[in-house]
Amino acid sequence: MVGQGLPYVVDSDELVDGDGGDRKDLAALLRQLLSVLVERETALLHTHGVDMWEYVVLGGLELGAAQTQTRLAGAVGRDKTRLIPILDRLQARGLVNRRPDPRDRRNRIVSITGPGRELLTRCRRDVRRMEADLLAALDPAVATTTTVRALVLLAEAAHPSHGQDMQNR
C-alpha cells in the first residue's frame, strides 16, 4: 500500500530481482531512520531524567531480575565495565536494586524497583507516541501492523539469540 507523504515506494520484485534503481541500500535507509529515532528518543528520555543506556537497562530488567551483572550486560549489549556506572546511577535514584547472590556472593542480582518500572512505563509511553507520529507518514492500515511487525521479524532473524539472551538472564 502506498502511504501519503512517502517519497519512494518499493515494488517487491525490485527488492529481489532488480538493481534497486534509485533506492538506497537497506543499511543506508535504516541508518537514516535510526539517526532520527535516536535523536528524538534521546530528547524524550532527557525530559524524564534518563539517558538512552539507563532506559535500555531498565527495559532489560522489565521481565525479571538479571542473575548476574555480566548476563545483564550481555542482554543489553553493553560491556560490563560500562554497565556498572549506569547501575550505580540507577540504584542511587532508587530505580534498580542490586543484592548479593546467595549462591555466589561475588555476583550481584539486579532488579528493577517499582519507581523504576513506573519511569520505564512513562518513558515507553512517550516513545510510542513519538513513533506513532513518525509512522503517521504511512498508510494507517500498514503503519502499526505490517511495518512494525516486519521490523521486529527482521531484527529477530538478523540476531536470533537476542530473545534467548534476554530470557537467560
Image (cartoon, helix red, strand yellow):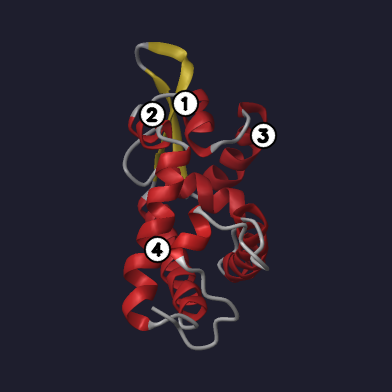
**Disc number placed over residue 71 in the picture, else none:** 1
Q: Amino acid at mark 4?
A: Val
Distance of label 3 from label 1 (alpha carbons): 13 Å
The disc labelled 2 sits on which kind of residue?
Answer: Arg
Residue 103 visible? The answer is: yes
- Mark 2 / mark 4, whichever is N-terminal: 4
Identify residue for label 2.
169
> Which of pointers 3 and 4 indicates the residue nearer the eye?
4
Whether the residues at callouts 2 and 1 have beta carbons within 8 Å, the answer is yes
Mark positioned earlier in the residue sequence (2 or 1): 1
Q: Secondary structure at mark 3?
A: helix
Q: Nearer the viewer, residue 22 or 141?
A: 22
Mark 1 vs mark 4: which is more N-terminal?
1
Q: Kindly identify which residue carries mark 3.
A: 82
Residue shown at the point (43%, 58%) measured from the top left: 120
Circle number at residue 31: none
Q: Circle 4 sits on which residue?
A: 148
Q: Measured from the top left, where is residue 143 in percent x and y? A: 39, 74
- Specify the amino acid type for callout 1: Arg
Around disc 2, counting alpha carbons within 10 Å, would you say few (fewer than 14), some (14 to 19), or many (20 or more)? many
Q: Secondary structure at mark 4?
A: helix
Which quadrant: the C terminus? top left
Give how far apart the Cα atoms at labels 2 and 4 are: 26 Å
Residue occupying the point 40% across, 43% down: 156
